[in-house]
Amino acid sequence: MKFSLVKPNTSPLDLIAIGLWKGQKETALLRLLDRQWNHRVSTLLKREEFSGKIGEGKLIQGDKPIHALLIVGLGEPNRFAAESVRQLAAQAIRTGQKVHAKKVGIEEPSLPKNKGETLQGLAEGAILGGYSFDLYKSKENLGKKTVEEVLLMTLKNGKQHSDAVARGRVIAEATNRARDLINSPASEMTPQRMVQEAKKIGRSAGLTVRIFDRAACQKMGMGGFLAVARGSVEPPYLIHLTYRPHGKAKKRIALVGKGITFDSGGLSLKTAQGMETMKDDMSGAAAVLSLMKALPELHVPMEVHGIAAVTENMPSGSANKPGDVVRTFTGKTIEILNTDAEGRLTLADAIPYAIRQKPDLVIDLATLTGACVVALGELCSGIMGNDQGLIDRLIKSGEQAGERIWQLPLLDDYREEIKSPIADLKNIGGKGAGTITASLFLEEFVKPRTPWAHVDIAGPSWTEKELPLAPKGGTGCMVRTLAYFLTAEANRR
Ligand code: BES
Ligand code: ZN
Ligand code: ZN
């Protein structure tokens, strides 16, 4: 998809999309078109009481040279306004594909300053909205991707503006790359294949790639990770990508993603329905690896480590068993009482490995608990950690990126629940607060103490419904938030 910046105009186009905020009656381009079309548009909008509420859309048959006009409601220009801008572009592209448009124009909506970069948002929305996972569709079932060119209609045309568009493209393509990894079936996207993908990313982005196989992980004492891997015939790997900027790095950041390429539950087997979407249990790793490729293009001036312990969680004669005790990287022992609480076992090794890189801060992303989906649903991630400033900054970056994150309290009193009579810890808590006890468990491995935030993405990593910016399936959540976060973090003081 090609983007260009052009002045608002009415030269030949297959589709033009224009957004209207609540109460807004017209834009420069709408006035121009309305005049050309004998006030047909304004009459129609008045008659049908177009209110501008978010999601409202009106497709109007055009006159040559413009074949169709799409008017989209943008809602209130409040603090989520940047997301309305993305959704406008996404809707424009989807409508464009439906009407077989090749060239689509989108007028840049007016947005109060400091409410977000509109051109970047339009590029993000267009690329996210145009995504579909087509690898397994035969020709006759393939939706046509007709849109080739997007004209962003704006009075801006400086380098900083084309740079903003380029940034939007990089961030959205990284998100779509994560979606591809997640949507690929687990029998394809095995730990081994994840390693191949990591190597490909590393090669194309000039990253340092380190891969540790089972024996190497054994040597490092990663008993938690390897216990999970025991039940599978697929060999496990620890993936470690490093990005180093040109010049002196301002900070060192470690990102850790949960990488269970399929979570059957192990011997604590899930139900058939519970397993249906469990190819998505590597969404954290997918986000981290995909984002790593974008770092050089985003000119992030910090050293970033992307780490994922990848394995399947399967039942078999060699699988780990409830009651087993394992020793982890830091020496802490864990009694495994439920083999389906496997994410925290892998993170119990991966997080300390990340901390050994001496980062200034560490963030982990994990589809960790069903309890988080119960608490916050599919549209919101949970966040917990040991550094309120870091948590606040991540939530704020999420807001700017259009991803919702809500903090849950890391109540120290619940730590009792994960104590084991025979080991240092057990891998499940009591009946309630499953998301919090899982986080408390992880915190035991954030040693020596490092600013740390854990994002439980069990809800938003997958969507059962089509969303404004994503079709059903893997969403690539948190790629955008982390991209915004890294940019903001680099500019902090
Ligand atoms: N991968 C799951 C969490 C999950 C569940 C993600 C549903 C998305 C949707 C995780 O490994 C898991 O199974 N957790 C258990 C923990 C329990 C045994 C303490 C859970 O949430 O049921
Ligand atoms: Zn599980
Ligand atoms: Zn899992």
Image (cartoon, rainbow, N blue to C red):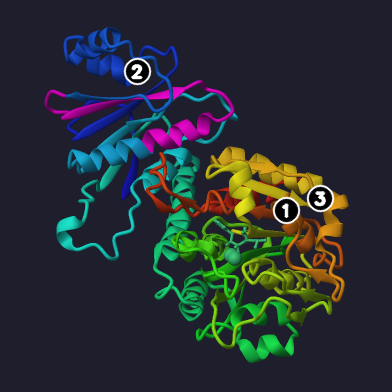
Residue labelled with disc 2? 28
Residue 435 in the image, given as x and y percentages of width and height = 70, 53
Type of the residue with mark 3 = Asp
Q: Is residue 328 above or below residue 454?
A: below
User: Label 1: how many residues lie within 10 Å, few (<14), some (14-19) or many (20+)?
Assistant: few
Q: Amino acid at mark 2?
A: Ala
Q: Estimate the x, y position of residue 391 in percent, counting from the top left.
A: 74, 46
- Using the rendered image of the protein, determine whether residue 487 is visible from the camera's viewpoint: no
Q: Mark 3 or mark 2, which is nearer to you? A: 3
- Decide: few, some or many residues near mark 2? Use Cα within 10 Å; few <14, some 14-19, many ≥20: few
- Name the disc covering residue 387, or none: 3
Instruction: Count residues near mark 3 (Cα–Cα under 10 Å), then give few for <14, some for 14-19, many for 20+.
Output: few
Whether residue 199 sits left or right of residue 52 in the image: it is right
- Residue at figure coordinates x 72%, y 81% from the top left: 222
SS of the residue under disc 2: helix
| Quadrant holding the C terminus | top right
The answer to which of marks 1 and 2 sits earlier in the sequence is 2
- Separation of marks 1 and 2 at Cα, in angstroms: 58 Å
| Residue numbers of the magenta segment | 62-89
Residue depicted at x 81% and y 50%: 387
Q: Is residue 217 above or below residue 398?
A: below
Who is closer to the viewer here, 17 or 286?
286
